[in-house]
């Protein structure tokens, strides 16, 4: 009985040691650009990317993202992509039809955001250096992009 208990204890410890440590991916800042800023001004749009806590080795990134339109006119979110580790990752939202997303004036909507990394890539490698979420939009004042910097760090990062 003691031998079996010792074997199970060693096996449990090996499983714990083999687990990948965790990491945090969080929003650093955001910046709105408009193609027609000189003519119409930049719309008042803000983005909140919730911090994720992921295991190193995971091959995906899917934060909760909300966009707030403080402008007096509606806009349409046409797409989202992630640029990190020298690669552009296309958004693969889990819902069948997520885009375009209409964002009425003075409202907030969640976006479907989910990225799968290629073979040999994981969240630790992709976020060794800060990456950028690019949220493309259009509206009466023209089209533009919201650039949100996201960076990886230790699990204890806030």
Image: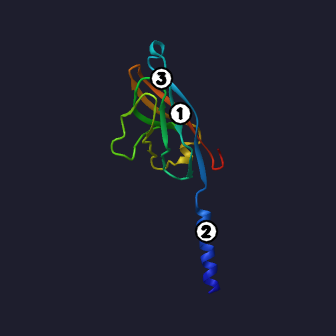
Residue 32 rendering spot, x and y as whole percentages: 51, 26
Q: How packed is label 2: few (under 14 Cα within 10 Å), some, or many (20 or more)?
A: few
Question: Residue, x 46% and y 27% (percent of image)?
Answer: 145
Report the side of 37 relative to 101 (left or right): right
Of residues 59 and 157, the one drawn nearer to the viewer in this rendering: 157
Is residue 134 shown above or below 34? below
Q: What element carries label 2?
A: helix
Q: How far apart are the two marked residues, 1 and 2, measured between alpha carbons?
A: 39 Å
Question: Residue, x 56% and y 42% (percent of image)?
Answer: 127
Q: How far apart are the two marked residues, 2 and 3, measured between alpha carbons?
A: 54 Å
Quadrant assignment, res 13: bottom right
Please tell me the numbered disc located at residue 43. Answer: 3
Q: In the image, which is nearer the foreground, mark 2 or mark 3?
A: 3
Question: Cβ–Cβ below 8 Å for labels 2 and 3?
Answer: no
Q: Earlier in the sequence, mark 2 or mark 3?
A: 2
Q: How packed is label 1: few (under 14 Cα within 10 Å), some, or many (20 or more)?
A: many
Find disc 2 in the rendering and name its residue. Answer: 14
Of residues 156 and 20, the one drawn nearer to the viewer in this rendering: 156
Seen from this angle, which residue lies furthest left? 97
Please tell me the numbered disc located at residue 119. Answer: none
Residue 110 rendering spot, x and y as whole percentages: 45, 40
Residue 123 rendering spot, x and y as whole percentages: 53, 47
Q: In the image, which is nearer the foreground, mark 1 or mark 2?
A: 1
Q: In which quarter of the image is the N terminus?
A: bottom right
Seen from this angle, which residue lies furthest top? 39
Q: Which of marks 3 and 1 is nearer the N terminus?
A: 3
């Amino acid at each position: 009985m003691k031998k079996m208990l010792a074997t199970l204890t060693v096996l449990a410890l090996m499983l714990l040691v083999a687990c990948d440590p965790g990491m945090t991916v969080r929003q650093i800042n955001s910046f709105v650009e408009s193609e027609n800023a000189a003519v119409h001004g930049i719309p008042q749009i803000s983005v909140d990317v919730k911090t994720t806590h992921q295991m190193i080795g995971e091959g995906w990134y899917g934060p909760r993202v909300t966009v707030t339109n403080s402008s007096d006119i509606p806009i349409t979110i046409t797409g989202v992509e992630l640029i990190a580790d020298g690669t552009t990752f296309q958004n693969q939202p889990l819902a069948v039809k997520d885009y375009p997303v209409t964002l009425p004036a003075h409202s907030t909507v969640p976006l479907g955001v989910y990225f799968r990394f290629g073979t040999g890539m994981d969240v630790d490698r992709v976020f060794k250096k800060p990456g950028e979420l690019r949220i493309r939009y259009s509206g009466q004042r023209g089209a533009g992009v919201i650039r949100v910097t996201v960076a990886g760090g230790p699990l204890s990062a806030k």
